[in-house]
Image: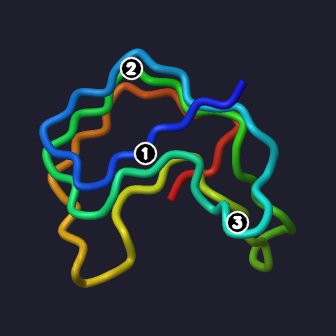
Amino acid sequence: MLTLLIYQNGNYNIISYGAFGPTNSPTGSSWELNVVDTNSQYNWLHHNTFHDFGSCQGTPPNGNDVASVLDIGYESIADTTKYNLIEDNAFIMAAIM
C-alpha cells in the first residue's frame, strides 16, 4: 500500500501520527514521495513515519542520491514555502531532501 502526503498552497495544517510509504525507487519524474511546497506555510508535521523510499547509490565522494521521501519547498524564487515545523518524525530506509 502506498500512502502519499502532498500539500501545495496549504497553510496552518497539522499532520500527525501518519505513516507515509512504502514504494519502490522512483521511475521517470517521480522524485518526491511526500511534498510540502508551493507557498505552504505554518504547517506542523509531527510523530509521522516516512519510510521505504529513495536511496543513495555509489560511494562517497562519487555517490548520488536517488529520490526523496520528504521534500519541502519548491526550487524557485517565487515559492514562499517557509515556517513549517517538522519534529518528532521517524525516517526509516529513506532519503531526505
> Is 7 left or right of 35, judged from the image as shown?
left
Q: Is residue 65 above or below residue 35?
A: below
* Mark 1: amino acid: Ile
Picture quadrant where residue 63 is located: bottom right
Is residue 60 placed above or below 94 in the rendered structure? below
Q: What kind of element bears circle 2?
A: loop
Specify whether 33 is left or right of 70.
right
34 in relation to 87, above or below: below
Q: In the rendered image, which quarter contains the N terminus?
A: top right
Q: Count how many numbered circles sit on residues in the image.
A: 3
| Position in image of residue 9 (x %, y %) | 23, 55
The residue carrying pointer 3 sits among few (fewer than 14), some (14 to 19) or many (20 or more) residues within 10 Å by Cα, namely few
Q: Residues within 10 Å of mark 2 (few under 14, many from 20)?
A: some
Q: Is residue 95 above or below residue 20?
A: below
- Residue underneath mark 3: 65
Q: Earlier in the sequence, mark 2 or mark 1?
A: 1
Residue 61: which quarter of the image? bottom right
Q: Amino acid at mark 3?
A: Asp
Label 1: which residue?
A: 6
Element at label 1: strand
Disc 3 is placed on an element classified as: strand
> Could you tell me the amino acid type at mark 2?
His
Residue closest to the eye, 26 or 87: 26
> In the displayed image of the protein, which residue is found farthest to the right?
58
Task: Indicate the position of residue 23 as horizontal and vertical percent values.
Answer: 75, 38
Mark 1 or mark 3: which is in front?
1
Tell me what residue is drawn at x 50 percent, y 48 percent: 70
Q: Which mark is residue 47?
A: 2
Gap between marks 2 and 3 measured at Cα: 25 Å
| Residue 10 x, y percent position in the rendering | 22, 47
Front of the two marks 2 and 1? 1
